[in-house]
Amino acid sequence: RYALQNNTYDPANVVDGNKRTAWIEGVDGPGIAEWLNFDFGRDINLHRILILPGYFKSAKIWAQNNRLAAATFQFSDGSSRRFTFPDRMERQSLDVGSIRTRWVRLVINEVYYGTDPDTAVSEVAFEWEP
């Protein structure tokens, strides 16, 4: 999505450590099948994904924007995991076991609808070991 006033909605916002910023897709409709890719630059053993599935700037902004109801996480080893999310403004912790991967792709499958037509993700972080 294009910037509005002083707010940007770039993919880098999901890894900036600031829950008050977000990536917001900008295609027509709710963004089903839109994706974010996270490249680690080397193989890692991934254990957990931490995600803020919506725009966590405020409770009002969170409710206005579409938020993830379900997403698929794809990994460089060819595997994938689908997760569903409750419609609550809280961090989700997704256990993936131990996956050896160089990258992770988050694909939007389903959303909870707000009054804004686009879907937001505030933060994504990974727990891993070399």
Image: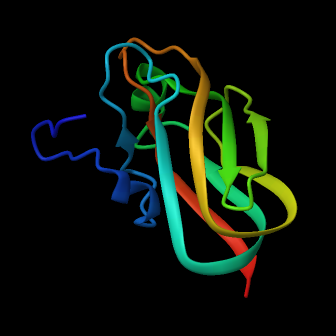
**Could you tell me residue 77's position as x and y percent?**
74, 61
**Could you tell me residue 32's position as x and y percent?**
51, 22
Q: Of all residues shown, which one is farthest toward the left? A: 5
**Could you tell me residue 73's position as x and y percent?**
68, 46
Q: Residue 71 or 94: which is nearer the viewer? A: 71
Residue for point 58% across, 18% down:
112
> Quadrant location of the N terminus?
top left
Q: Of all residues shown, which one is farthest toward the bottom? A: 130
Residue for point 58% across, 37% down:
107
The mark total stands at 0
Residue 108, above or below 49? above
Q: Is residue 120 left or right of residue 49?
A: left
Q: Residue 126 or 75: which is nearer the viewer? A: 75
When asked about the image quadrant of residue 61, the answer is: top left
Q: Residue 73 or 20: which is nearer the viewer? A: 73
Residue 76, above or below 70? below
**Could you tell me residue 92's position as x and y percent?**
71, 47
Residue 22, above or below 4? below
> Quadrant location of the C terminus?
bottom right
Q: Is residue 85 left or right of residue 119?
A: right
Residue for point 62% across, 51% down:
51
Q: Of all residues shown, which one is farthest toward the right? A: 97
Q: Is residue 111 left or right of residue 31?
A: right
Q: Is residue 53 left or right of residue 80?
A: left
Residue 62, above or below 100? above
